[in-house]
Image (tube, rainbow, N blue to C red):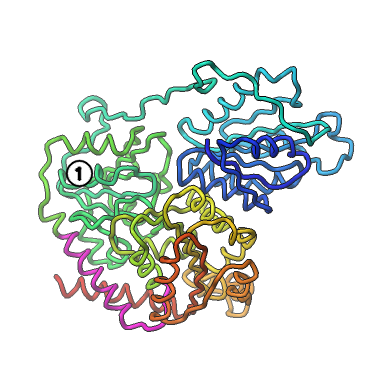
Amino acid sequence: MGHAVVSPGSRSAPLALALAGDLRLRLHVVLDERSAGFCALGIGKATGVPAVVLTTSGTAAVELHPAVVEASQSRVPLVVCTADRPPELRGVGAPQTVDQTQLYGRAVRWFCEPGVAEAATMSTWRSLAARAVAEATLAPAGPVHLNLAFRDPLVADPEPLPSARPDGLPWHRVPLRSRVGVPGEAEDGTGVPAAERGVIVAGAGVDDPEAVHALAAARGWPVLADPPSGCRLPAPATVGAFDALLRHRPYAETQVPEVVVRLGAAPASKVLAGWLAASGAHQVLVDPERAWIDPERTAGVVVPADAAAWCRARAAEPGPGPGQWLRSWSEAESVAQEAIDRTLAHHHEVTEPGLARTLARALAPGTTLVVSSSMPVRDLEWYAAPRRDLRVLANRGANGIDGVTSTAVGVALAEAGPTALLVGDLAFLHDANGLLGLAGRGVDLTLVVVDNAGGGIFSFLPPARLVEAERFERLFATPQGVDLVALAALHGLPAERVADVAGLGAALDEGTQSGGQVRVVVATTDRGANVAVHDEIHAEVAAGLERST
């Protein structure tokens, strides 16, 4: 472990002082506990190694619950340490006391309450710590919760830690079980049937995109690649505009697969999900922990396997290679990408699809882009062009919009290279405390905020059509009326507002070349016009497909 995120408190003082005194750890002090939890989540998401997050007792511990839920559902390792009152101060009205036993319920992989820290139990501490890390990192990875009680005095110089093993290894090591699981089809039916018309759907969680494309080349199948999968490469099999293509019913009805291989998390596109569900194809879901990522209940086979190893094993089997099926997808992809560029070129104002596409193109090689749920993750999925050297992360376990800025801060603290965030105005405000102290953290982070004065996604949903306009604005769109540039400036962060494409390009160039600084770019868009731009893009893609047939 390399990072500890600490929120200030009294009851947690003994462990805070010990963490601060251990030079093996990078210590990050975050005032707001909710932000602290998501910051630690971001570190774990970026590195695959759990960070410690420490809070004091009472509602401070409760504030970690959203981050714990997201860590659980997105399988991110996290070690949560909540300080607590000793037993004699519980249930008697002592301040800052709530029932913290099993506080996070079934969201944690392991809960332990070892009792009051005292000399008599010191010999167990290394075992406790080693098991906590093991439980957080074993498949499926996720959060663990240590509820640690301390008695007065709470402030003192930490004594030496209990003796370590002579060889310096962890007190407990739990070898990871093999997660390769690549048996042949003849053995148990977990292979892939031979078929010309197959597709690979790649979502977040794929750790070797080249293995996926090796399988695609061997079978002659397209890869419908979500940006967080890392598979949206400029390669012959890549289809990035799958959502726009499948919205054109004549195309979707002719491109019906016989076999579907699903890797990683499900993309956000409902159009894709509906097309897969209606296809009648044999669907193979591959996941190292046999996670049941199957909301439509269409997977015929669930394979507990490492996606990369499984793909390479399948790629080594005889296959037809690229043919007319793959060419038809590749040609349609070219038509769609050209149509998207052509449509957006007519708009000199900032559009949300254009912002997502421009940002994904403009970021320097090696950048990590954190993208918020709601519309930003969809615009990136639907409109970002294929490219290399861009890592995309998103909190899509619980799909919430809380803690997004703090997650990006955690990613930036853990990453050596530049980090960017694409976030909506409501999500930005929801985590405004993630900006506390950000100016002094020395991270390379560009925050791009889509300001459409409310919840833009609701303009695409039934309430926009079925609810009277004034009531829709109050209950769903919820315009916020906050000057986001002033909010950033209040936290000592350089910020600017842009409304046209020229200003956006200049601001992104300046922000992504700032090097070791935090910068906020607020892009003004219009919710009503945004729906029209999406429709315009889809119509142009459809027209292009009609012309090409």
Is 297 rendered above or below residue 331?
above
Please report the residue visible at 20 percent of the width from the left and 66 percent of the height from the top.
334
Quadrant including the C terminus = bottom left
Q: Secondary structure at mark 1?
A: helix
User: Which residue bears the numbered disc 1?
Assistant: 214
Where is residue 460 drawn, in percent x and y? 46, 70
Position of 11 with respect to 526 (left or right) is right
Position of 26 with respect to 340 (left or right) is right
Where is residue 433 drawn, in percent x and y? 64, 60
> 171 or 529, which lies in front?
171
Which residues fall within the magenta stretch? Answer: 328-352
Where is residue 99 drawn, in percent x and y? 76, 37
> 224 or 464, which lies in front?
224
The amino acid type found where label 1 is placed reads: Ala
Query: Is residue 382 something that shows in the picture?
Result: yes
Q: Quadrant of residue 131?
A: top right
> 437 or 498, which lies in front?
437
Q: Quadrant of residue 149?
A: top right
> 243 or 4, which lies in front?
4
